Amino acid sequence: MNTNLARLAVGETGRITAIGSTGAMKRRLMDMGLLPGAEVLVEKVAPLGDPIEVRVRSYYLSLRKKEAEGIMVEVKS
Amino acid sequence: MTAAPKLRTSAAADPPGDARAITVAVAGNPNSGKSTLINAIAGTRLQVGNWPGVTVEKKEASFEHAGRHIRLVDLPGTYSLSPYSQEEIVARDYLAHERPDVIVNVVDATNLERNLYLTVQLLELGIPVVMALNIHDEAEAKGYRIDVRRIEERLGIRVVPTSATKKKGLEQLLEAMVGTALARGARKPVDLSYGPDLDAAVRDVARELVARHPQLVDRYPLRWLALKVLEDDERVSAETSLDRDAFAAATLEHLRTAHGEDLEALLAEARYALAAGLAREVLQKPELQKIELTERIDRIVLNRFLGIPIFLATMWIVFKLTFDLSSPFGEWIQGMTSGPFKRWAATLLGGVGAPGWTVSLVNDGIISGVGFVLVFVPVIFAMMFFITLLEGSGYMARAAFVMDKAMHAVGLHGKSFIPMVLGFGCNVPGVYATRTLENQRDKVLTALLVPLMSCGARLPVYVVFVGAFFPQNPGTVIWSLYVIGIVLALVMGVVFKRTLFRGDAPAFIMELPPYRMPSFRSLCLHTWEKGKHFLTKAGTYILAVSVIVWFLLHLPWGVESKKDSYLGKAGQVMAPALAPLGFGTWEAASSLITGVIAKEIVVGTMGEIYAPAPEHAEEAPTLGEDLKEIVTSFGAAVGESVGNVVSTVGISSLSFEEKEDHSALKGALRGAFTPLTAFGFMVFVLLYMPCVVVAIAMRQEFGGWKWFGVAFAYQTALAWVAALLVHEGGRLLGLGG
């Protein structure tokens, strides 16, 4: 199933299929290891509902949902 | 020697041959333990400054090792060498243009893959690299087995396992960097393969660069430049005005058909593929991984229900420790400078027959100014210590994670919360604390709002006025002023977001690093660097302003009444502007002007203007008594500091009990103000221009006076409008004016 990273539930893993954002934002996401093919596990949602914490390339990263929406993923079962 | 000396600045001064100085650039990811490693190597020899033109911190150290002169340059911690953040630009410009003899790449051994992504980019520069495989002890404790030899072989560089906190591997690292720098040319890093298509494209572009732009090949490392051309790197394009599409047209066409339009993404993928491949090859993780400590802590600290209470409790502890630990020492310094130091100066000047006005200048201008700078030292040191602890331990990132949504609503960043909270104690550490934010926009916006947090220096003003006009409910009135400041900060946040800081808020893409205990030595060094920086830089300005205010008060010569001094005259000029607010008198205006040094000075000036105390000669204590008093009062300060922290739950340094008797002043004020105008005056004091120390902090953090100018203008306008609303609104409600 294809969706974006912001829509994954806590505990779900997705494989990145595309980065929708452009320019500096895209490069920043890529530099942090969010590239097509990478697997991302949603670890937590902040107490106020945003941002989220994910695990990628064996480290923890937080990003706002707005940024996560630009990351297309294929949900892994 | 084959390699030409690269040190343009120092090459001439150095002895010829192998004894020349070696320049070492230290690069690495944030949270890779780079600062700790540098502190462990260079210690107090580090010089802290800024990179030219930007407000990114620059650390450098020069020292001798094994008979060689080594110059160590710490590059900002970055995840990449992209042309987007200030830090990344500083790091890559330095590497590409200054070309150090060797790069020490600090790599977090517990987080190999992402760290190697930067390593791959560093290798593109063709500069010899030594890898410090740092935090090696922690990786071992986790059962990681890293094949150091294999990394060396695959990358063609020396790799030294280190543990900066335990000071392990430092000698070997120094030896490796000197050895690598001296063997320059003999040992080159491997040109890593990015796959046949990209490799061919890099070769083609490089060939055409050599043929068509030989002057550029002198300015940039060739392979690096070819890669930047392929990536269509913004910054290199702007610097060289090279057009990517004018190069290797056929190869580019092939790349695009095979791999898509976005070559920048293609290269990022190739680099990460290399990093991931290498990490897989050299790293063996234990089959069964324990649930890590970080994960266990985060289950509690970031919990849906506990996250915010834990954050607030942490803030309260940090605030209490910062201000309650430091304030007795600040008062001790104040007591020393205002008492014994002034008496000694007076005795000394009197002894050499200097005229009376010099005593006043030295005491009220210079010693007061110096004392004023010194009073800030304990609080700045305490704040820096705790902020560094929060950052180094990994909690700062969690605090930002927890608070981001709330702060983002007013255009701020999750990390903005901490500077704002510190602002309640003193705006100065609040402004300095904005350096924990990564983005310039977030830093500046936060610093602009910090002065609206009612600081401890405004309390004495409130206390006197509340005592004179609202003795029945002092707490409520003072509380309302804090609330006004907070509400206006929220409003101004939204206003700035829509005006000066229009456009998208910068992204919030932040690593949550593992929790670690920073080394005490590193903490202290960092704190010391910052404190020293404040003393030397801020001190000069504060002293100058203090002397200027003294002259304003005492010139022209022989002035009898304060009304005729320059300060009084300035007050008379300003008074009409304050008339609509209900306190348009020269006395009020003059007092407000002296508040530029610190808002609490408003009370002192008012005391002198409204209720001048008759001079009375005191029995001066002897030198011995003075010295004894200084020592015993220091002991008392230590006791009080400890007592503050353990005895009460509240913040003792912010309790509003009066420390001096102001009954004469209060009586005079009751004649000059009504309760309504008194409240308006307090609102004005809360909001109008930040004090000179905040101005200097802003200048130090953001370069130039521009942002202080903005703060000065908007705050003074805001103060005027708010006080007017209080005055007019109050009159409409029939509160009298």
Image (tube, helix red, strand yellow):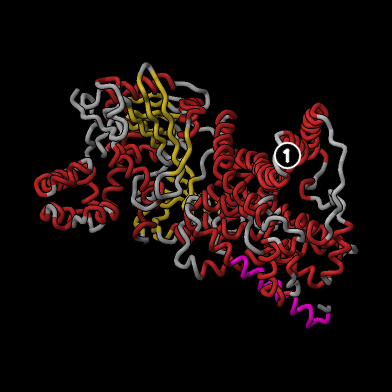
Image quadrant for the N terminus of chain B? top left
Residue B26 placement, left or right of B221: right
- Residue ID for mark 1: B337
The answer to which of B81 and B16 lies nearer the viewer is: B16
Residue B121 magenta-highlighted: no
Q: Position of residue B426 (x, y in %)?
A: 67, 50
Residue B721 magenta-highlighted: yes
Residue drawn at (63%, 62%) of the image? B689
Residue drawn at (72%, 53%) of the image? B457
**Is residue A32 something one can see in this rendering?**
no
Q: Position of residue B138 (x, y in %)?
A: 50, 28
Q: Position of residue B720 (x, y in %)?
A: 66, 71
Image quadrant for the C terminus of chain B? bottom right
**Residue type (three-letter) at the residue carrying disc 1:** Thr
Task: Write down the region rendered in magenta.
Answer: B714-735
User: Residue lying farthest top?
Assistant: B66
Report which quarter residue B21 is drawn in: top left
Report which quarter residue B455 is drawn in: bottom right
Q: Position of residue B731 (x, y in %)?
A: 79, 80
Q: Decide: is B410 above or below B524.
A: below
**Is residue B216 something one can see in this rendering?**
yes
Report which quarter residue B469 is drawn in: bottom right
